[in-house]
Image (cartoon, rainbow, N blue to C red):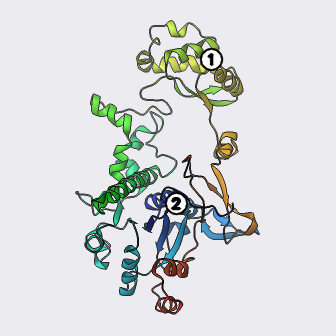
Amino acid sequence: MKEQKNNGPLSGIRVLDMSRILAGPSSAQLLGDLGADVIKIERPGSGDDTRGWGPPWLKDDEGKETRESAYYLCANRNKRSLTIDFTKPEGQKLLKELASRADVLIENFKVGGLQQYGLDYESLHAQLPELIYCSVTGFGQTGPYAKNPGYDFMIQGMGGIMSITGEPEGEPMKVGVAIVDLMCGMYASVAILGALRHRDQGGGGQHIDLALLDTHAAWLINVGMNYLTSGEDPLRYGNGHANIVPYQPYPASDGYFILTIGNNVQFRKFCDFAEIPEIPDDPRFAENQDRVKNRDALEAIISRATSVQSKAHWLEGLKKLGVPCGPVNTVPEVFEDPQIRHREMEISMDHPLTGDSKMKMIGNPIRYSETPVSYRNPPPMLGQHNREILKDWLELEDNEIERLSQNEVL
């Protein structure tokens, strides 16, 4: 993919990404996709922890493995890497100078961890009142758990999602991706955009305090609201839906397909096609509330009917009738899907290590009509842009950059 012009809605916004792992980096990547100039601040010599979270590793143009992990690559596009040892006074001074030229700073250090370096919100806000400072932690800046570390898997357990995921009689089950981190990153992006709007209206900068556990509780959404409304502990329904039936995978003669029926018209169309036309008139299944109450009986009837025909029979026939249904794709099938390809959800980018073979990445799903996202920079190698950034942001001379390097500040 050739270098793209940046006319995104955040063009001109400067972001210091001092976060690691996934929540903060994914938020910063989204801001970068929208046009922001994102500088990834990393530890000299090691960098973001996820650089070592392989295999798999990016392969070079000869097919040999590099030391750039797929995990790191997933959340660090559209950034430039700058290594700074801010445990040293010169490193702290350098970071403060960068912050003075930034609009946003994102960090995910433990609560109070940056205070000793004068890089906490209170210290920087006193000097830089326009700076938007976003802190991402496991449990937030306040409360009885504030000092505790928080990790995606831990929060999936604490936040309730594992209690409602998996088969009814099976063990608690986590989601297959780090959904806690990712959703917290999404909330962080929204919060930053709101804070930028507030600042641009004359309100100044502010501190954004985001917690993995808080955001997890928020995205329990309808299941959480079911509990708050009824007082009843939500059950695990496997692949079923707490409020809609039928709404889950069903067996075909050669695998599974998904049925997502949302109203009585769709339900009757399905039953007619499945050659069980009497079912919608059965009082046990006439309305969705009846179907939810008698889900076990209905699922057994539907499963017997669907198991005698192929996936293609159901998918092709039901789509013609306007009955919502879909396949159960593997990950390779997702990226081979014609709709995914048409929407360019798989992209390729140049990378210094891959030569002409390029690297593949997951595209951004946002489609603006006037200010499209752009893919300008592949995930950077550690310290790749040290000299470039210090010249660009701080206008440092070569001899000063060399001195910082020799003093192991960079």
Q: Which residue is rendered at x = 34% and y = 63% of the image?
A: 132
Q: Say few, some or many: other residues with alpha carbon within 10 Å of mark 2 (under 14 / 14 to 19 / 20 or more).
A: many
- Image position of 1 with respect to 123: above or below: above
Q: Which mark is residue 158?
A: none
Describe the element under mark 1 as helix, strand or loop. Answer: helix
Asked where in the image residue 146 lies, by quadrant, the reply is: bottom left
Q: Where is residue 180 shown, x and y percent of the image? A: 42, 51
Q: Which residue is rendered at x = 27% and y = 74% of the image?
A: 123
Camera-side residue: 361 or 69?
361
- Can residue 87 be seen by looking at this rendering? no
- Can residue 381 be seen by looking at this rendering? yes
Q: Say few, some or many: other residues with alpha carbon within 10 Å of mark 1 (under 14 / 14 to 19 / 20 or more).
A: some
Residue bearing mark 1? 305
Q: Where is residue 272 shown, x and y percent of the image? A: 61, 11
Type of residue at label 2? Answer: Gly
Type of residue at label 1? Answer: Ala
Asked where in the image residue 115 lies, by quadrant, the reply is: bottom left
Residue bearing mark 2? 35
Describe the element under mark 2 as helix, strand or loop. Answer: loop
Residue 223 appears left or right of 308: left
- Image position of 97 with respect to 306: above or below: below
Camera-side residue: 18 or 31?
31
Dot 1 or dot 2: first in sequence order is: 2
